Amino acid sequence: MESKVTTQLGQECLQGLMRVWFDFERQLGRVPIIQRLERGKFTREDYRNLLLHLRQQVIEGARWITRGASSFERDYADVRSEVIGHAKEEHRDYEMLEADFVAAGGALEEIRAGQRNAGSEALHAFMMYRASQPNPVDLIGAMWIIEGLGQKMASDWARRIDEATEGDGRYTCFMRYHGENDDAHLDKLYTLIDRVCRTPEQQQAILRTARVVARLYALQLEEIEHG
């Protein structure tokens, strides 16, 4: 990975992002619903609850990505183009998630009527705030966490879910899709790190946003128990 990032600041930023990721993994390991998944005590009801709460983040994700794109000024036109392309690729992912929910025994009306939990509210508010700032290069830190989930965990989660619930893959399409496709998304992030991490201040902003998003994402999953 480091070979894709060539500047000293960029490499330091990447190393910092990797440390944030390892801490995020530890946070996820303390989340009850993820603990049940890893111990093979995950039920189909757990899965529907997981999708119900994830949908709120997925459906709002395209909004903050698009808002972020619109906040990049002329000097960052190339970055804006990359972010717009990312939003275009993912802005209807929630439909795949809804289809999985129905295939797992849920009602479409139920998931569409779902509301953000406390963690989802905090994550959405933070992301929209950051995306509204001029030239929000720190969103790279947010995308590192969210895309990293797809690249590093989605396929494993899908496999574990099918094993625990005796599934055949027909209701884990959303996670399998991201497990297969988020490698390419992370590759684009690597190419952007050198571009947007030009000063120590930008480096610290990227790492801070990554840490905040990691904590709020874990909180979103913790709040499933209270939904």
Image (cartoon, rainbow, N blue to C red):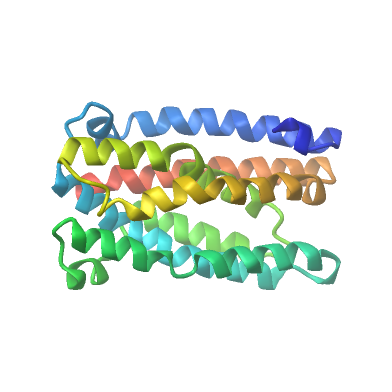
Using the rendered view, name the quadrant where residue 190 is placed: top right
Q: Residue at x 72, y 67 (%)?
A: 80
Is residue 30 something one can see in this rendering?
yes
User: Percent x, y for residue 105?
Assistant: 13, 59
User: Percent x, y for residue 102?
Assistant: 20, 63
Closest to the observer: 115 or 5?
5
Closest to the observer: 203 or 52?
52
Using the rendered view, name the quadrant where residue 81 is placed: bottom right
Location of residue 216 with respect to 85 vertically, above or below = above
Location of residue 194 with respect to 130 vertically, above or below = above
User: Percent x, y for residue 194?
Assistant: 80, 45
Q: Residue at x 19, y 73 (%)?
A: 109
Is residue 227 something one can see in this rendering?
no
Question: Is 108 left, or right, of 128 in this rendering?
Answer: left
Question: Is 53 left, or right, of 123 in this rendering?
Answer: left
Q: Residue at x 37, y 44 (%)?
A: 219
Q: Residue at x 23, y 59 (%)?
A: 101
User: Percent x, y for residue 8?
Assistant: 85, 33
**In the rendered view of the protein, which quadrant contains the N terminus?**
top right
Closest to the observer: 74 or 102?
102
Using the rendered view, name the quadrant where residue 86 is placed: bottom right
Closest to the observer: 179 or 114?
179
* Tally of numbered discs: 0
Question: Is 68 left, or right, of 29 in this rendering?
Answer: right
Location of residue 26 with respect to 213 vertically, above or below = above
